[in-house]
Amino acid sequence: MKPWVHLGTASIPNNGGELKFSRRDNEFSIRLSGVRGELMNSRMYGSEQALSELGCAHIKQSDSAQVLVGGLGMGYTLAAALNAVGPSSQVTVAELIPEVVEWNKGPLGDCAGHPLQDSRSEVYLGDVADLLLQKNEHYDAILLDVDNGPEGITQKDNNWLYSVEGLDDIYKSLKPEGMLAIWSAGYDPMFVIRLKKAGYQASTKTVRAHAGKGSKHTIFLAQKPWR
């Protein structure tokens, strides 16, 4: 088996560690220093696609949806969101780490079909929380894949997103019947309770990392009721 070739390193803000980007033939990997295993692998993206498919299912017939993706990763969530919405829609992806955007503009972009080149996509280089704090009922769907789930690992500031205060601000950023979808490495029953207390109609789906096999991940689905 061919060895991995190191392609780049990126520092995570606020002393969050380093991301290490590697390639082996047509397979790409992103790892976090000090954490065993991979954060992302280009062969395992089923749950990232499911995040968008489930989070955007209610707007498949909308021609002009507004979608926010938190975390670019390897581009699969963004690509699936673009596939789920109409020709006049806009999908904004917020990415905190500039190098991740550059990696997706390079050879990594082939994996997800270069979604950054889609005219409907827009990159916000910064914290997704900056957009959520506007609280202006702008989004039909908010898809968050910024960490391992409701407890920040790569970025402790992500904990705000899953707090009572953060969930309230996200609620105010969604249009009526808008959907918040969150990727998680595992199920957290207390987080479901927190979502319901924040006013969402909450449920979960268990999905696989790759085409019906691989690790099981959880998608938290939280819909804002119609007024």
Image (tube, rainbow, N blue to C red):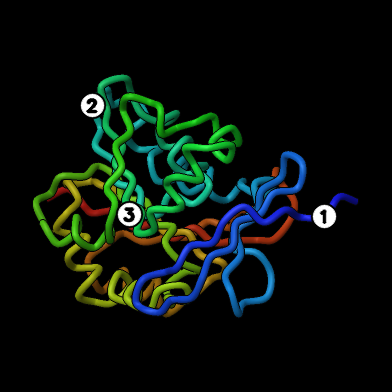
Q: Mark 2: which amino acid?
A: Ser
Instruction: Check disc 1: other Cα within 10 Å, few if <14, some if 14-19, many if 20+.
Output: few
Task: Name which of mark 2 and mark 1 comes first in the sequence.
Answer: 1
Query: As rendered, which of 61 and 214 lies closer to the eye?
Result: 214
Reading the image, the residue beneath label 1 is 3
Query: As rendered, which of 215 and 126 lies closer to the eye?
Result: 126
Reading the image, the residue beneath label 3 is 180
Reading the image, the residue beneath label 2 is 64
Label 1 – label 3 distance at C-alpha: 39 Å
Query: As rendered, which of 80 and 61 lies closer to the eye?
Result: 80
Is the C-beta separation of discs 1 and 3 under 8 Å? no
Q: Residue at x 35, y 48 (%)?
A: 69
Label 2 – label 3 distance at C-alpha: 18 Å
Please tell me whether mark 3 sits on a helix, a strand or a loop: strand
- Tell me where residue 128 sits by quadrant: bottom left
- Tell me where residue 111 sits by quadrant: top right
Coordinates of residue 199 in the picture (x, y in percent): 22, 66
Q: Mark 3: which amino acid?
A: Leu
Instruction: Check disc 2: other Cα within 10 Å, few if <14, some if 14-19, many if 20+.
Output: some
Label 2 – label 1 distance at C-alpha: 45 Å
Task: Name which of mark 2 and mark 3 comes first in the sequence.
Answer: 2
Q: Residue at x 69, y 69 (%)?
A: 37
- Number of numbered discs on residues: 3
Question: Relative to residue 106, is residue 24 drawn left or right?
Answer: right
Coordinates of residue 188 in the picture (x, y in percent): 49, 75
Q: Residue at x 58, y 37 (%)?
A: 107
- Kindly give the residue lying farthest to the top in the view shown: 87
Q: Residue at x 48, y 49 (%)?
A: 51
Please tell me whether mark 1 sits on a helix, a strand or a loop: loop
Coordinates of residue 154 in the picture (x, y in percent): 46, 72
Q: Mark 1: which amino acid?
A: Pro
Is the C-beta separation of discs 2 and 3 under 8 Å? no
